[in-house]
Image (spheres, grey):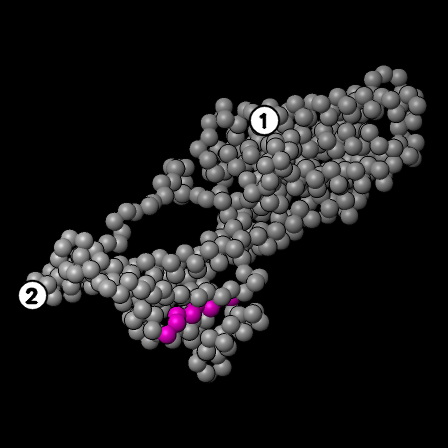
């Protein structure tokens, strides 16, 4: 009964504080929604976008035409050849890129087709001379064609690499086509026969690289902004339960409520337990609210829908484990410090550090090796690992036990220290 009375008292304290209610429930909704929008583009594949890039083709021959056509048909790039109604020159295009008007420039130099054709003919003659079919060419001068790419300095690395890779692949295809044509011409000139068919030989797609995705029980799912941000910032909000918990706890200490409790004979366990279970319920309500945001609100705003699968039991266990750890941490901060300033300053900084270490802001795998080691000590990392295992992977319950165990051990340790610090405060 004492525990239920404490829970009821905490409930009345919270509902009489609209600002506290807003911070606990409204702010996490805003945070999850805002961060999902902010990080939507970085989580999306570059092929889902269509970028305007400048293209200056001074070749006006087959290589330049091939590059233009291939870039346009890729679906990722929209080639711009004019600016303000006038054809763009190389100098003007470079200035437009440097000024940030366009993200990139592809420049195909004059006589590019002629140079690569001469180079290809030289290669074919050298190869055929090795078989004794033709004389070795006397002119061994190798001409190099340089297709220039100019990037805006602020362009993202993934777009830079995407365009570089696309142009290199296109040029490789053009070289292959020209090589087959030259072989066909040389064989025809030697044998006097008609086209041998080399010109129509297709050496593309001889090796296919495909992605084999796991069967997850629902559509093949990969990480996106919603799948990352909803569980990540839900845990962040749950650990920020330290603010109302520590605030109310220290307020009671300062206004004499704890002194009156001290005069009551018996254990103080019910006081600690009542607060703990009440704020654990608040954490679980936060979790449910954030899942609802991912399932219903974010899709209405044009973002992806959170996919949770059918492992509701696993999700419930994970939510309980995370809630136990978050509430225990808040209770530890509330009992360990004397003043609001100390508790809230330490609590806020500690949660931010644990979130950064745990991969809430930046995925752990791109952190430096030393930070990846430190990440394994963050309870938010354990919680995020749990959510990723359940939402994104085909995971058995036994695979969840390590992270669940860490969260429960962390919660038990924090609760033990909280009870110890509370008893010390009561004796003073």
170 and 416: which is toward the camera: 170
The residue that label 1 is drawn on is: 404
> Where does the C terminus fall, quadrant-wise?
top right
User: Sequence-wise, which precedes: disc 2 or disc 1?
Assistant: 2
Residue 394, magenta (yes or no): no
The quadrant in which residue 359 appears is top right
In the rendered image, which quarter is residue 386 located in? top right
Residue with the most extreme top position: 266
Quadrant location of the N terminus in the rendered image: top right
- Residue 285 seen in this snapshot: no
* Residue 218 pos. (x, y %): 41, 40
326 over 46 or under it: above or below: above
Task: Give percent across and percent down for residue 208.
Answer: 30, 47
Query: Magenta part mainly helix, strand or loop?
Result: strand
Is 142 located above or below residue 209 in the figure? below
Name, please, the residue furthest toward the bottom. 85
Image marks 2 and 1: residues in contact by CB distance under 8 Å: no
For image coordinates 77% across by 47% down, the residue present is: 18
Could you tell me residue 167's position as x and y percent? Answer: 39, 61
Instruction: Write down the region rendered in magenta.
Output: 103-110
Relative horizontal placement of residue 325, taking residue 223 as reference (left or right): right
Viewer-side residue, 95 vs 239: 95
Residue 311 placement, left or right of 368: left
Q: Relative to residue 373, is residue 50 depicted above or below?
A: below
Pointer 2: residues within 10 angstroms few (<14), some, or many (20+)? few
Q: How far apart are marks 2 and 1 (CA)?
A: 78 Å
- Res 143 seen here: yes
Compared across the picture, whether 84 is left or right of 279 comes to left
Q: Mark 2 sits on what residue?
A: 192
Magenta span includes 107: yes
Q: Which residue is drawn at 34% across and 61% down?
A: 171
Between 381 and 331, the one lying in front of the other is: 381
């Amino acid at each position: 009964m004492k525990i239920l009375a404490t829970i009821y008292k905490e409930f009345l304290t919270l509902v009489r504080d609209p600002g506290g209610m807003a911070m606990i429930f409204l702010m996490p909704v805003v945070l999850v929604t805002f961060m999902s929008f902010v990080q939507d583009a970085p989580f999306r594949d570059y092929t889902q976008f269509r970028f305007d890039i400048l293209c200056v083709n001074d070749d006006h021959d087959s290589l330049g035409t091939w590059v233009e056509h291939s870039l346009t048909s890729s679906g990722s790039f929209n080639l711009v050849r004019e600016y303000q109604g006038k054809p763009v020159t190389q100098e003007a295009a470079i200035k437009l890129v440097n000024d940030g008007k366009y993200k990139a420039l592809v420049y195909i130099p004059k006589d590019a087709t002629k140079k690569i054709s001469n180079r290809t003919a030289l290669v074919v003659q050298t190869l055929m001379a090795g078989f004794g079919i033709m004389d070795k060419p006397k002119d061994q001068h190798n001409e190099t064609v340089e297709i220039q790419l100019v990037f805006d300095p602020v362009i993202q690395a993934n777009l830079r690499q995407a365009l570089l890779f696309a142009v290199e692949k296109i040029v490789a295809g053009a070289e292959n086509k020209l090589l087959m044509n030259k072989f066909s011409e040389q064989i025809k000139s030697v044998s006097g026969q008609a086209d041998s068919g080399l010109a129509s030989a297709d050496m593309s797609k001889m090796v296919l690289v495909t992605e084999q995705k796991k069967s997850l029980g629902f559509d093949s799912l990969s990480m996106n902004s919603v799948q990352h941000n909803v569980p990540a910032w839900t845990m962040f909000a749950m650990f920020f339960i330290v603010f109302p918990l520590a605030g109310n706890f220290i307020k009671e200490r300062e206004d004499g409520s704890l002194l009156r409790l001290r005069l009551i004979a018996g254990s103080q366990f019910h006081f600690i337990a009542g607060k703990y279970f009440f704020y654990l319920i608040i954490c679980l309500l936060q979790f449910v609210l954030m899942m609802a945001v991912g399932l219903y609100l974010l899709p209405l705003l044009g973002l992806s829908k959170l996919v949770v699968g059918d492992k509701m039991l696993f999700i419930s266990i994970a939510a309980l484990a995370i809630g136990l750890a978050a509430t225990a941490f808040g209770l530890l901060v509330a009992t360990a410090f004397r003043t609001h300033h100390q508790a809230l300053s330490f609590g806020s900084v500690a949660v931010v550090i644990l979130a950064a270490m745990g991969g809430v802001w930046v995925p752990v795998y791109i952190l430096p090796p030393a930070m990846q080691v430190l990440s394994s000590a963050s309870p938010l990392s354990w919680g995020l690992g749990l959510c990723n295992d359940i939402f994104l992977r085909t995971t058995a319950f036994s695979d969840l036990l390590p992270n669940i165990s860490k969260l429960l051990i962390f919660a038990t340790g924090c609760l033990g220290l909280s009870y110890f610090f509370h008893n010390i405060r009561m004796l003073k």
